[in-house]
Image: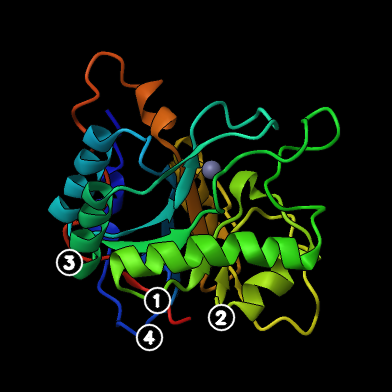
Amino acid sequence: MWQLEFLRKKIIKSALIAIPVILFLSLNTEVEGAPPEKQITVVFRFDDYSSLSSTEFEVKLINTFRKYNAACTFGVIPYACAGDEHDIRPQEVVPLTLKKAAILKNAVKEEILEVALHGYSHQAIRKKADFDYTEFSGLDLNSQMEKIAIGQDYLEEMLDIRIATFVPPWNTYDLNTIRAVEKLGFNCFSANESIEAMKSSLLKFVPATCDLIELRQTVKSARRASDRQPVIVVLFHEYDFLENNKENNSSLCFSSKESMTRMGF
Ligand SMILES: [Zn+2]
């Protein structure tokens, strides 16, 4: 069972600044010797929600965020690759079902979730032996725009919302991905810390900075850091829980009763 209750007493409410947004958790870090204005922002990013992912687990996850009055950004795959996502041969895709869309829609209405577009099908276009897995990097601009736009249109129609954040599968992308995402009207981009972008880019970059296991230590480090407003982006997947909760994966415990608010992007 995840024991992140240590966060609970440290969390304060921050203001809703703007929509669309990536959701975040604001921690009051009134530790000895630290000025009161010190504030640590923790963003939770859960990837790989699709028609093929575990609905039972995801409902428990959403319920847990609701229970603690917290929120999370879900990276959603609109047309999930039907087979092995690492197999580069042509494959069928499974569109997000109405049932899975309804779960997201309700949670978005409750302000528990922000939905981010997590690629088109999450299928690799090259073997890992060449580079890392990727769905986009190396494709020309038009091809990338076409894939992203199809996924964006479908998700926005299914959920009846504008989607502001793009999360590339495997955190891999190139400058054409950035250009495509900008041209399609996204304003926030979350991959990992290896940021590649044009200076002219207007996108807000919110890279993942740690996983759940590292979160406790990362918050401790952030408290000691000279940065007065550090941002921690916690990337996690379903397997992070299942691998570590074989005996009791029905309990997901973390975050705060006080607040999860929104980053003003
Ligand atoms: Zn993914």
Of callouts 1 and 4, which one flags the residue occurring earlier in the amino acid sequence?
4
In screen coordinates, is 197 left or right of 119? Answer: right
Q: Nearer the viewer, mark 1 or mark 4?
A: 1
Q: Is residue 5 visible?
A: yes
User: Which of the numbered marks, if any, corresponds to residue 36?
Assistant: none
Which residue is denoted by mark 1 in the rendering?
162
In 3D space, how far apart are the residues under numbered discs 3 and 4 (Cα atoms)? 16 Å
Q: Residue at x 30, y 15 (%)?
A: 246
Which residue is denoted by mark 3 in the rendering?
110
Q: Nearer the viewer, mark 4 or mark 2?
A: 2
In 3D space, how far apart are the residues under numbered discs 3 and 1 (Cα atoms)? 16 Å
State the residue in front, 220 or 142.
Answer: 142
Of callouts 2 and 1, which one flags the residue occurring earlier in the amino acid sequence?
1
Q: Tag 4: residue type?
A: Ala
Marks 2 & 1, CB-CB < 8 Å contact: yes
User: Which of the numbered marks, if any, corresponds to residue 18?
Assistant: 4
Mark 2, secondary structure of its residue: loop
User: Within 10 angstroms of label 2, few (less than 14), some, or many (20 or more) residues?
Assistant: some
Q: Residue pushed farthest top?
A: 247
Marks 2 & 3, CB-CB < 8 Å contact: no
In 3D space, how far apart are the residues under numbered discs 1 and 4 (Cα atoms)? 13 Å
Q: Tag 2: residue type?
A: Gly
Q: Position of residue 120 (x, y in %)?
A: 55, 52
Of callouts 3 and 4, which one flags the residue occurring earlier in the amino acid sequence?
4
Q: Tag 3: residue type?
A: Glu
Of callouts 4 and 2, which one flags the residue occurring earlier in the amino acid sequence?
4
Q: Tag 1: residue type?
A: Arg
User: Within 10 angstroms of label 1, few (less than 14), some, or many (20 or more) residues?
Assistant: some
Which residue is denoted by mark 2 in the rendering?
185
State the residue in front, 244 or 139.
Answer: 139
Q: Residue pushed farthest left?
A: 67
Q: Is residue 32 visible?
A: no
